Image: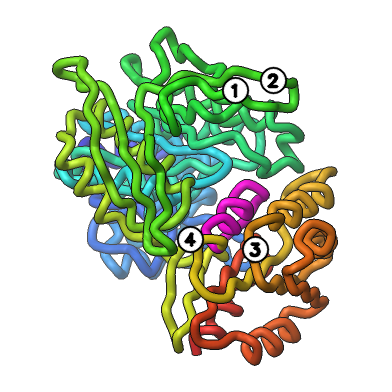
Amino acid sequence: MKNMTLEHIAAVCGGTYIGNEADKTREIQGAVIDSRLVEKDYLFIPVRGEKVDGHSFIPSVFEKGALAVLSEEKLENPAGPYILVENTLDAMKKIAADYRRGLDIKVVGITGSVGKTSTKEMIASVLAQKYNVLKTEGNLNNEIGLPLTIFKIREEHQVAVLEMGISEFGEMDRLSTMANPDICVITNIGLCHLENLITRDGILKAKTESFAHLTPDGIAVLNGDDDKLCDKKVVNGKPAVFYGIEKAAKVAETEEGTKTLAEKTVYATNVEAVDLTGTKAAIHYPSKETGGEVTMEVTIPIAGEHNVYNALAAVSVARELGLTCDEMKRGIESVQTIGGRSNLIHKNGITIIDDCYNANPVSMKASIDVLSNAPGRKIAVLGDMGELGAEEKQLHYMVGEHFAGKGIDALYCVGTLSQEITKAVRANSSATEVHHYEDKADLIKDLVKEVKSGDTVLVKASHFMGFPEIVKELTK
């Protein structure tokens, strides 16, 4: 890792180097918190957990070839050098921030209430048509996952696409200090983490903490159809790049009344669902070279209008980084889903929409819209959504109201809060057969007996509900 000598690392994190003087100028080749991942000349960062203290693995990592370790305690006769610090997690964040700033690389930081991971995958797929891209794996987007991702950047990488997820004020400030993005993408301001952030205005304030840590020439790429983001027309003295469906500013009914949203720089028209296999759209953007409008017909291989927004975000970023129209189109049309996020599984004649990694009111409604376009019998299997604050019951009820006119044949729910979904469905979609369960095992037992060839089943809930178990039973 370029310039990451033990001497430099100690200075950056405010630690004390203890060891052989000759080793101070050696560079580490990687940094990890999992002792099983240690390789030759790595830095091991031990973390104190609820059940396991990483410090207990220090002797074994030296046996594996670690160059050095961080430690919160003085070590007796260590087999190699170490850096004594007050807190290893705080030290890790400081080291990551310093390492990122020493890299000649473009960084795209992605945040938002909904769609961070799918947008990250879309942007990475597009940028990979021109550049060597490193992206956040899975959803390693917190104050541990982000620095570990930054430590994986090497000199051959040209762009890093980094996902940043938060649940409280100040967290984005710490994340974006490390990421130091050249381009900051915010997908939307929805209804997540309301327990700590209280209101959508609170969410907006927390997400936009990232703006203070953009590079000097950095820009913001924002969803112009979002009634909160549309007000951020200038960020750090530079015009924001807005994207959305249709160029003209929409007029929307919001919490504050009727509001005109933003005119979009990058926009889509002629959006058309292709059952569950994808979505067609025409994407328009101004050429950086000529200023003239470029129109690109694409078929996004993932269903749902929300994936059109993901593609628009990707085009907005790609345009800034000099990709051609052909490169953008190729990246959009080759993007792949990942498990638990609108992932289509075909088994025993049944189509399963595996969208059970997480859930909130906005993503629930989007998934119901996708299910409504499915052929055959449509079955929704839904569970509770977490971290919605004082209005959690009302927000679950709103999801049930969204069933009106969608043609969903059956609803299977489990969880205390999902009772509100079933109430609303009974009141607004009388043709939908409704089942509610106190126990997930009982739901699974009835569901697997009920589904048959030709059915499409949507499986979605917050992560704590453990809905991958339902997917597993359906795919046996």
Does residue 476 lie above or below 46 as drawn? below
Is tag 1's residue or tag 2's residue first in the polypeptide sequence?
1
Q: Which amino acid type is shown beneath numbered disc 4?
A: Arg
285 relative to 292 in the view: left or right: right
Q: Was residue 365 drawn as part of the magenta stretch in this picture?
A: yes
Residue drawn at x 63%, y 67% is: 51
Above or below, comparing residue 198 to residue 52 in the picture: above
Q: CA distance from mark 1 to mark 2?
A: 7 Å
- Proximity of marks 4 and 1: CB atoms separated by less than 8 Å: no
Dominant secondary structure of the magenta stretch?
helix
Which one is in front, 433 or 5? 433
**Distance from Cα at disc 2 to Cα at disc 4:** 33 Å
Front residue of this view, candidates 290 and 69 = 290
From where the camera sits, is residue 89 visible?
no
Q: Which residue is mark 1?
A: 251
Q: Mark 3 or mark 1, which has the lower sequence index?
A: 1
Q: Which residues are magenta?
A: 357-371
Dot 2: element: strand
Residue on which disc 3 sits: 461
Asked if 55 appears above or below 120 in the picture, the reply is below
